[in-house]
Image (spheres, rainbow, N blue to C red):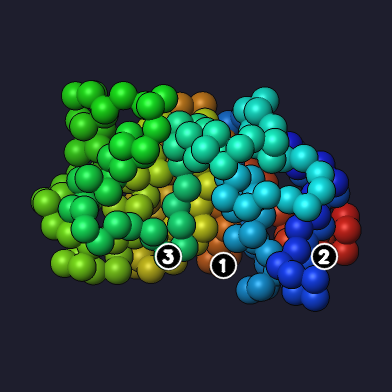
Amino acid sequence: MVRVENLTFGYGAKGFRLRVPDLLLEKGERVAIVGPSGSGKTTLLNLIAGILTPEAGRVSVAGTEVSQLSDTQRRRFRASQIGFVFQDFALLDYLPARQNILYPYRITPALTLDAAARARADKLAAACGIGDKLDRHPGALSQGEQQRVAICRALVTQPNLILSDEATGNLDPDSKARILDLLFEQAEEAGATVLAVTHDHELLPRFERVLDFAQFREGAPL
């Protein structure tokens, strides 16, 4: 599902640099990434999603070399193939929760906003405990509720790849378990791969594989 080969990326000539010699994620895998803050975990997710492009190397998702697509092609590919739970949620303040969840359907012609998609959005929201808050704007929601909206948005398109950047970071233990159950349930239903950045080591046994990001800094393949 994901292949990263000989990737290098840097922020400016003297800024942070990331090197990933080799990374392979199989279809349906549940993989966690751990490592110290500032080590490049979020940068890697952004490179896989095509939000950033590498200086060198290749990033492929579901057989498509994302790093070779144009900006427009990457946006459309990301909207239709990748569900991304951003660490800062990336919600649009001017849209109510329901429309934030359905936003991927508004930005790419590859997706059709039909009754099934709307029903799926409502079902996901109910499963996340925000079914009664779909008409509220982000400013009227708590941080935890905003996070759940972001999770629903990542899942609503039934993507092939789910990227999660601290998706459960602002939730209580019971909610963390429920959200992770939902992520894995939706991934299994769609045959999707899950790649999740987390600092919560109590969640690691739920994943099939754990990647220690310190190895990237040493140049070792994972």
Report x, y in % for residue 40: 68, 64
Residue 115 sits in quarter: top left
Instruction: Look at mark 2 in the image and give the residue it sits on.
Output: 217
Which residue is rendered at x = 57% and y = 50% of the image?
Answer: 51
Report x, y in % for residue 136: 14, 57
Residue 154 sits in quarter: top left
Q: Quadrant of the N terminus?
A: top right
Report x, y in % for residue 152: 32, 45
In the picture, measured across the screen, residue 130 lies left or right of residue 9, that is left
In the picture, measured across the screen, residue 213 lies left or right of residue 45, that is right
Disc on the earlier residue, 2 or 1: 1
Alpha-carbon distance for marks 2 and 3? 25 Å
Alpha-carbon distance for marks 3 and 1? 15 Å
Specify the amino acid type for callout 3: Asp
Mark identifier at residue 88: 3
Instruction: Look at mark 1 in the image and give the residue it sits on.
Output: 199
Which residue is rendered at x = 42% and y = 65% of the image?
Answer: 88
Indicate whether 141 appears above or below 190.
below
Whether residue 89 is visible here, answered yes or no, is yes
Indicate whether 139 appears above or below 222.
below
In the picture, measured across the screen, residue 87 lies left or right of residue 36, that is left
Q: Is 138 in front, or is 211?
A: 138
Which residue is rendered at x = 34% and y = 45% of the image?
Answer: 153
Q: State if disc 3 and disc 2 touch (CB < 8 Å).
A: no
Please name which of the two marks, 2 or 1, marks the residue nearer to the observer: 2
Please name which of the two marks, 2 or 3, marks the residue nearer to the observer: 3
Report x, y in % for residue 117: 26, 29
Mark identifier at residue 141: none
Callout 3 crowding tier (Cα within 10 Å): few <14, some 14–19, many ≥20: few
